[in-house]
Amino acid sequence: MFHKILVALDRSDNSQKIFEEAIAFAKAAGATLMLLHVLSTDEDVAPKLPTMAAMEYYPIDGSFFGDYQNRWQLYEKQGLEFLRSLADQSAAAGITTEFTQNSGSPGRTICELARMWEADLIIVGRRGYSGLNELLLGSVSNYVLHHAPCSVLTIQGQPQANPAIAHDQPVAAES
Amino acid sequence: MFHKILVAVDRSEVGLHVFDEALALAKATGASLILLNVLSPEDEESPSTPMLNGHGFYPGGLSRSVVEIYQELWENYVERGLMTLRSLAKKATAAGVQTTYQQSLGSPGRSICEWARQLDVDLIVLGRRGRSGLNELILGSVSNYVMHHAHCAVLTVQHPPQPTTDAAHDQQVATV
């Protein structure tokens, strides 16, 4: 049975479902939880680096870059708040819970932490990308399945609408 | 939480380890178990098709036809699978878990996903053979297929990689 469960969460709608499954799982197994959020430019809610469309240079004239930095710090802060609120929920359910926020490539970060923390189970969600979308956007669950040092539970999520639409949102919010 | 768990079992060490994990999980969550044994020519336990090495034809003129021998070996293989299922189901029932079992024929990944959908399970438990690189490309990864095609959650249980498959194949030839 599993004693140390690493739960990889992002700030998408699927995370709530994954978190609930993880809580139920940890309760049944009497395991401790480690909640992980990976800060990554791949995440939909992460701020995008400001580039001018069709002009191949970065307009680094201070204000743009400062703005980007501010938004990144906000992204970090929101991530921590997100983790803290989930950790409170699972502590209330009587489960020993830790949380951490690292930055890097999601798949690699998850596997590294699993090795360091000596997890015996990783719980990840499937975003449900397939075909070309999977090839371009990468499948975190696929990477984890192939590189994990321990058992892996993949939880089926609802396939997101068009990821391209989600990418447009932060741009729209800028103006 | 999970209520109906499908476990892919075979007679290997990995298969038994997977079964143990699934049983512990079912016990803890009060779920029911479905044990599935897939008969497949890709299975290391299955008899190899009889051929004369290097000749590329099926030898005839033996006292019993080679096909008959192959058939007998295959029936043995089916029977051994059933025996494993029966004994595991007995063990799970004794532990207080409601258990059924099922044997099917075909490609392991596809069979597992099809049965999971048909029986409307909410979790599939299977082992990782731990193949990677070229071995995975050639021999196929059942866990990879299942993860990409399953309609429900998938638990892959880690097991240390097996040395090579050659040793097992040599044995088969020797017993034949």
Image: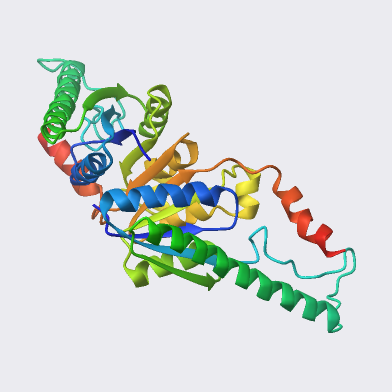
- How many marks are shown on the rendered structure? 0
| Viewer-proximal residue among B85 and A68 | A68
Looking at this rendering, what residue extends furthest in the bottom direction?
A62
Eyeballing the image, is B14 above or below B94?
below
- As drawn, is A41 to the left or to the right of A61? left
Residue A147 at x, y = what percent?
41, 59
In the displayed structure image, the side of residue B55 where residue B11 appears, left or right:
left
Q: Residue at x 67, y 60 (%)?
A: A45
**Position of B118 relative to A53 (above/below):** above
Task: Spot the residue most to the right.
Answer: A55
Residue A73: image x %, image y %?
A: 67, 76
Q: Residue at x 19, y 33 (%)?
A: B97
x then y, percent, for residue A129: 59, 45
Nearer the observer, B124 or A92: A92
Q: Quadrant of the N terminus of chain B?
A: top left
Q: Is residue A118 left or right of residue A70?
A: left
Camera-nearest residue between B64 and B38: B38
Q: Quadrant of the C terminus of chain B?
A: top left
Q: Position of residue A116 (x, y in %)?
A: 36, 72
Residue in the foreground of this view, choosing between A146 and A81: A81
Question: Is residue A96 visible in the rendered structure shown here?
Answer: yes
